[in-house]
Amino acid sequence: MFTLKEILNLGLPLVLDGGVLLLALAGTLVGMFIGAMPGLTGVMAMSILIPLTYTMSPTEAFALLLPTYVASTYGGSISAILLNIPGTGAAIMTTLDGHPMALRGEAGRALGLSCTYSFIGGIVSGLFLAFLAPILALWAIKLGSREFFAVAVFGLGIIAYISPSILKGLLAGSIGLLLATVGMDPISGYSRFLFGRAELTGGLEFVAVMIGLFGVGEIMFVFAKGVVERPRVQREIGLTLPNLKDLIKTIPTTIRSIIVGLFVGIIPASGPTIASVTAYGLEKRVGKRRDLLGTGIAEGLSAAETANNAATGAAIVPMIALGIPGDAVTAILIGAFMLHGLRPGPAMFISNPDIISGIFILFMLGNVLFFIIGLFGAKWFAKILDTPQKILLPIVTVFCFIGTYAVRTSMFDVFVAVVFGFIGLLMRRAGIPIAPMILGFILGPIVEDNLRRSLIIGGGNVLTFLERPVSAVLLVLTILLILSPSILSVLVKKKIKVNIHD
Amino acid sequence: MGRKLVLIGLVLMITLSLWAAGQPELKKVSFPEKTIEIYVGFAAGGGTDILARQLARNMEPVLGKSVVIVNKNGGGGLIALKEMAVKPADGYTLGLLLGNQFLQKYYKGSDTWIDPMTEVTLLGVFNQDPWGIAVKADAPFNNITEFIEYAKKNPGLRVGAGSPGTLYYWTWEALMEAAGIKLTIVPFGGTALSLTALAGGELSAAGASPSEADSLVSAKLVKMIGVSSEERLAAFPNVRTFREDGFDLVIGPWRALVGPKGMPTEIVKILEKAVRDAYYSDAFQTFIKEQGFGPLYLDTVEGFEFFKQEDTFFREIMKKSGELRGGM
């Protein structure tokens, strides 16, 4: 268990280095830049940056990646506010109140608020990460295959709800699960679906699949639709200091959204996007000015932006503490650990306390940096959106392929990315969401691996999952989560019947 | 058509005469003339990668040219080897071969494999890590004999290993065979994971080298009861060998430098010397001592004899457990 003093003693010597600080600054700038560009997500920014970290020390790698992550979650709100186009998925809710504010000529106010709320959410989640992750880690060393299985199944249970259509969400999730079975069976070592290709022994390369679906697929989708140049950003925006009155007025919303963000963020398969949707949904139910939401009020920005950044740190907690990726971003961060021969999880707190402390500090640093740069540089970031898409997108395409190739210097992976680009295009055309598919792909091996290992440990008895309190509770929760809509509808029907009888 | 034939004939004649003129020169190869690449089938920063990088660094002064590592990870080193094997056998593209490759050759579960006996040219074996047994810090056994006694009284003890595609799985099989005990082997995605499960109480023991278990040993969560090397490791003088306790089992993952099959003898000689000189250099010896890698050097002749033994060993062990590939 680390105290603040230990974190500073162990981590600061690693972080206080010219190169590391410069990388953190670069990561923040790249994160804001990519986050603000519609269609380009923090996930993509990080997967492009990952090959650059091969030759770096772990601290340098995280100095680049963590600020990119947190800054991109904020950056998405810039284009959401100015152009009504969410820069990242996490900024979808930000458009609802941010853009109306900008239309009223209060773009400065909206940008300042969004930056400040993001900062507040991020810092609180950073504290949560630094002081709760160690507790979780010591507790987690007692957790085993049965608990990991239950956690991953809970994540799978959520997949259906992150899509507007449950059926399409389940369809995409199942395809992801199926794709995850390619490669060597984790328990018996038998080859599956290799088609004689040695490249597939370890399964489909995650980065290739991800860049294909999100990057190549999105770019093809834009070009297939026909490139429409966006309206130019016209307004001049100076220093965008937040209005103190707005901040004080929205304290209850901010606190609620922090709690929602932390809770949703820590659940695997969730993350900033679902956190902001949930927080906005909650505000819509309990907020004092809920009727005005959507007309451009500060509460709307607070709900969306505090929650999505509060989820950033929380999403890293299961990864640091359990070695389980909560979403695509943490999956990339796990990759960054592994590149440096580190395996996140309980053992790492004992083996590499300095790197863990450095990560906490870098996470905080990323939040501070985007806060400062965001308040001063919003108008410069907005200029990126003026780049014509027919110039911007080809450049991005090149980066996609370089990034994929560089993962393990494999042309095969580039072809995989192209194939998944077409799959991504078809899915977008058919209105099938991409996120459940990638989550199924990530969670599939965790579910399979731990299910089969648990059964070996439990001597083949399925009830072994109920012997452990954590796995029992999680599995029951998952069943409730899946059944709750039907239970609710039965209850509601009864109520209506009762009313009729009255 | 006629003109094309004449042209082809001309080109052939010129090529032939150039080849004939160059013949005596070619005998005295000047090698290397450019950078040598070693394909490593494991992620940058992993144990195999850092060891390969150290070897490459120490080969450079011998060869006078750069030796660079290219990571092509996946398939337990197989992807890199497969790509390397189809490159020209000119000594500029080399690869790493591990004990795993013999497993893949004989294990009926693996779809693709490479035959270390016929598909590569051996340039030298430069390391063998010990395999060891880690148990919970408060376990009632302190050496291999006590562990075997305990396992005899409690059949089906759960022990952690890698998947059957890895050497760590089959070392348990070999131990069960040699000691006549029955254990439940639980496969994990990596040694760190099985060590964590051991510390958490899911397992009675986990296969691990002393350096892999070191962080958990220092946290007083696990202890090492022995290693399968011939002698104690310099970095871990307190860890006993199985032999000391009267149990003769010497086994462990080894690493060798190889090239594509059919390499010219002159180039093999030059590279063999480079591996040997690199291995015995002070820098390499200090490195393996500090990092806890196990020492072993075998030249191409000794190495090939060693390969033959490994080949028989893995074939036998697969046959006994009913996992031998058909037709092998």
Image (cartoon, coloured by chain):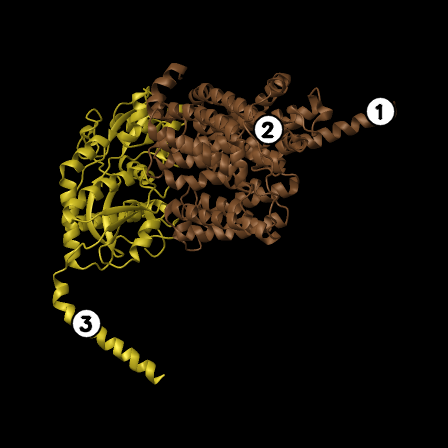
Q: Colour of chain A?
A: brown
Of residues B154 and A117, the one nearer the viewer is A117
Image quarter hosting the C terminus of chain B = bottom left
Image point (31%, 51%), residue name? B81
Front label number (2 vs 3): 2
Residue type, numbered disc 1: Asn
Quote the CA–CA distance across marks 2 and 1.
50 Å
Residue A499 is tagged as: 1
Q: Residues within 10 Å of mark 2 (few under 14, many from 20)?
A: many
Identify the subunit bearing mark 2.
A
Instruction: First in sequence, mark 2 or 1: give its number.
Output: 2
- Under tag 1, what secondary structure? helix
Of residues A272 and A231, the one nearer the viewer is A231
Asked if residue A157 can be seen in this view, the reply is: no
Q: Colour of chain B?
A: yellow
Same chain, labels 2 and 1: yes
Discs 2, 1 touching: Cβ within 8 Å: no
Same chain, labels 1 and 3: no
Residue bearing mark 2:
A108
Residue B18 is tagged as: 3
Count of marks overlaid on the render: 3
Residue type, numbered disc 3: Leu
Same chain, labels 2 and 3: no
Of residues B79 and A396, the one nearer the viewer is A396
